[in-house]
Amino acid sequence: MSILDFIQEKLSTTGNAVAKKTMDIADLTKASIRLATEEEKLEKVFAEIGKIYYEQYKNDPDARLKGYIAQVELMNEQLEELRTAIHALKREQPCTKCKMAVKNDAKFCSNCGAQNINYREEE
Ligand SMILES: [Zn+2]
Protein backbone atom coordinates (compact mmCIF):
# COMPACT_ATOMS: atom_id res chain seq x y z
CA MET A 1 0.00 0.00 0.00
CA SER A 2 1.40 3.31 -1.06
CA ILE A 3 1.46 6.16 1.37
CA LEU A 4 -1.10 7.98 -0.78
CA ASP A 5 -3.47 4.99 -0.66
CA PHE A 6 -2.95 4.73 3.09
CA ILE A 7 -3.79 8.40 3.64
CA GLN A 8 -6.79 8.15 1.31
CA GLU A 9 -8.09 5.11 3.21
CA LYS A 10 -7.48 6.80 6.56
CA LEU A 11 -9.37 9.89 5.43
CA SER A 12 -12.24 7.81 4.15
CA THR A 13 -12.41 5.73 7.36
CA THR A 14 -12.16 8.85 9.48
CA GLY A 15 -14.87 10.45 7.37
CA ASN A 16 -17.15 7.47 7.94
CA ALA A 17 -16.41 7.51 11.65
CA VAL A 18 -17.30 11.21 11.80
CA ALA A 19 -20.45 10.58 9.77
CA LYS A 20 -21.33 7.64 12.05
CA LYS A 21 -20.69 9.77 15.14
CA THR A 22 -22.87 12.56 13.69
CA MET A 23 -25.63 10.01 13.05
CA ASP A 24 -25.26 8.65 16.59
CA ILE A 25 -25.49 12.16 18.06
CA ALA A 26 -28.57 12.95 15.95
CA ASP A 27 -30.21 9.67 17.02
CA LEU A 28 -29.27 10.30 20.64
CA THR A 29 -30.71 13.82 20.48
CA LYS A 30 -33.94 12.55 18.88
CA ALA A 31 -34.25 9.75 21.45
CA SER A 32 -33.56 12.14 24.34
CA ILE A 33 -36.18 14.61 23.12
CA ARG A 34 -38.66 11.76 22.66
CA LEU A 35 -37.92 10.49 26.18
CA ALA A 36 -38.43 13.95 27.71
CA THR A 37 -41.69 14.40 25.75
CA GLU A 38 -43.01 11.00 26.83
CA GLU A 39 -42.00 11.64 30.47
CA GLU A 40 -43.84 14.97 30.35
CA LYS A 41 -46.97 13.25 28.97
CA LEU A 42 -46.78 10.66 31.77
CA GLU A 43 -46.49 13.42 34.40
CA LYS A 44 -49.64 15.06 32.96
CA VAL A 45 -51.53 11.76 33.16
CA PHE A 46 -50.44 11.32 36.79
CA ALA A 47 -51.51 14.91 37.53
CA GLU A 48 -54.95 14.23 36.01
CA ILE A 49 -55.29 11.07 38.12
CA GLY A 50 -54.35 13.17 41.16
CA LYS A 51 -56.98 15.83 40.36
CA ILE A 52 -59.68 13.19 39.89
CA TYR A 53 -58.68 11.50 43.15
CA TYR A 54 -58.62 14.84 44.96
CA GLU A 55 -62.12 15.79 43.80
CA GLN A 56 -63.54 12.38 44.65
CA TYR A 57 -61.82 11.64 47.97
CA LYS A 58 -60.72 15.00 49.44
CA ASN A 59 -63.17 14.60 52.34
CA ASP A 60 -62.11 11.04 53.15
CA PRO A 61 -58.61 10.48 51.77
CA ASP A 62 -56.46 7.39 52.15
CA ALA A 63 -54.21 7.81 55.22
CA ARG A 64 -51.10 7.94 53.00
CA LEU A 65 -52.54 10.90 51.06
CA LYS A 66 -53.89 13.05 53.93
CA GLY A 67 -50.74 15.19 53.94
CA TYR A 68 -51.01 15.87 50.23
CA ILE A 69 -54.72 16.72 50.53
CA ALA A 70 -53.91 19.16 53.33
CA GLN A 71 -51.15 20.64 51.17
CA VAL A 72 -53.59 21.15 48.27
CA GLU A 73 -56.11 22.82 50.62
CA LEU A 74 -53.44 25.19 51.96
CA MET A 75 -52.18 26.04 48.48
CA ASN A 76 -55.73 26.70 47.26
CA GLU A 77 -56.24 29.14 50.16
CA GLN A 78 -52.97 30.91 49.32
CA LEU A 79 -53.93 31.11 45.63
CA GLU A 80 -57.30 32.60 46.57
CA GLU A 81 -55.57 35.25 48.73
CA LEU A 82 -53.28 36.11 45.80
CA ARG A 83 -56.25 36.34 43.41
CA THR A 84 -58.05 38.65 45.83
CA ALA A 85 -54.93 40.84 46.17
CA ILE A 86 -54.55 41.05 42.38
CA HIS A 87 -58.24 41.94 41.96
CA ALA A 88 -57.84 44.72 44.56
CA LEU A 89 -54.75 46.09 42.80
CA LYS A 90 -56.62 46.05 39.48
CA ARG A 91 -59.70 47.69 41.12
CA GLU A 92 -61.98 44.79 40.23
CA GLN A 93 -63.62 41.73 41.77
CA PRO A 94 -65.03 38.46 40.47
CA CYS A 95 -68.61 38.62 39.24
CA THR A 96 -70.93 37.01 41.81
CA LYS A 97 -72.64 35.06 39.03
CA CYS A 98 -69.99 34.04 36.46
CA LYS A 99 -66.72 34.80 38.34
CA MET A 100 -65.29 36.90 35.49
CA ALA A 101 -63.43 40.02 36.62
CA VAL A 102 -65.67 43.10 36.90
CA LYS A 103 -64.20 46.59 37.32
CA ASN A 104 -65.30 48.31 40.54
CA ASP A 105 -66.76 51.22 38.55
CA ALA A 106 -68.83 48.99 36.23
CA LYS A 107 -72.52 48.69 37.14
CA PHE A 108 -72.88 45.36 35.34
CA CYS A 109 -70.70 42.37 34.42
CA SER A 110 -69.62 42.68 30.77
CA ASN A 111 -69.65 38.87 30.46
CA CYS A 112 -73.03 37.83 31.87
CA GLY A 113 -74.80 41.13 32.54
CA ALA A 114 -75.25 40.50 36.28
CA GLN A 115 -75.45 43.59 38.45
CA ASN A 116 -72.19 44.50 40.18
CA ILE A 117 -73.25 44.46 43.85
CA ASN A 118 -69.94 46.11 44.79
CA TYR A 119 -70.37 48.95 42.29
CA ARG A 120 -68.90 52.25 43.34
CA GLU A 121 -67.85 55.25 41.32
CA GLU A 122 -64.09 55.65 41.11
CA GLU A 123 -62.62 58.83 42.55
ZN1 LIG B 1 -70.72 37.82 35.23
Image (cartoon, rainbow, N blue to C red):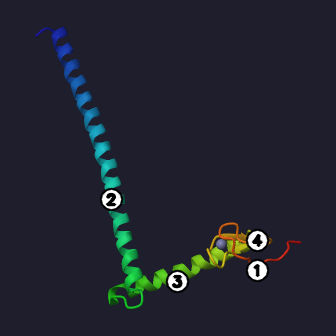
* Ligand 1 located in image quadrant: bottom right
Q: Which residue is mark 1?
A: 118
In front of the other: label 1 or label 4?
1
- Give the residue type that dot 1 points to: Asn
Q: Earlier in the sequence, mark 1 or mark 4?
A: 4
Q: Residue at x 67, y 75 (%)?
A: 95
Q: Quadrant of residue 21?
A: top left
- In the rendered structure, which disc, 2 or 1, sits on the residue that comes first in sequence? 2
Q: Nearer the viewer, mark 2 or mark 4?
A: 4
Q: Is residue 80 above or below residue 1?
A: below
N-terminal of the pair, mark 2 or mark 4, is 2
Label 2 element class: helix
Q: Amino acid at mark 3?
A: Leu
Viewer-proximal residue among 34 and 50: 50
Mark 3 lies on residue? 74
Q: Is residue 79 left or right of residue 109?
A: left
Q: CA distance from mark 2 to mark 4?
A: 42 Å
- Report the Cα–Cα distance between label 3 and label 2: 28 Å
Q: Percent from the top left, x then y, of residue 114? A: 69, 75
Residue under label 2: 39
In the depicted view, which residue is nearer to us: 50 or 64?
Answer: 50
Residue 39, picture quadrant: bottom left
Tag 2 or tag 3, which sits nearer the N-term? 2
Give the foreground label among 2 and 1: 1
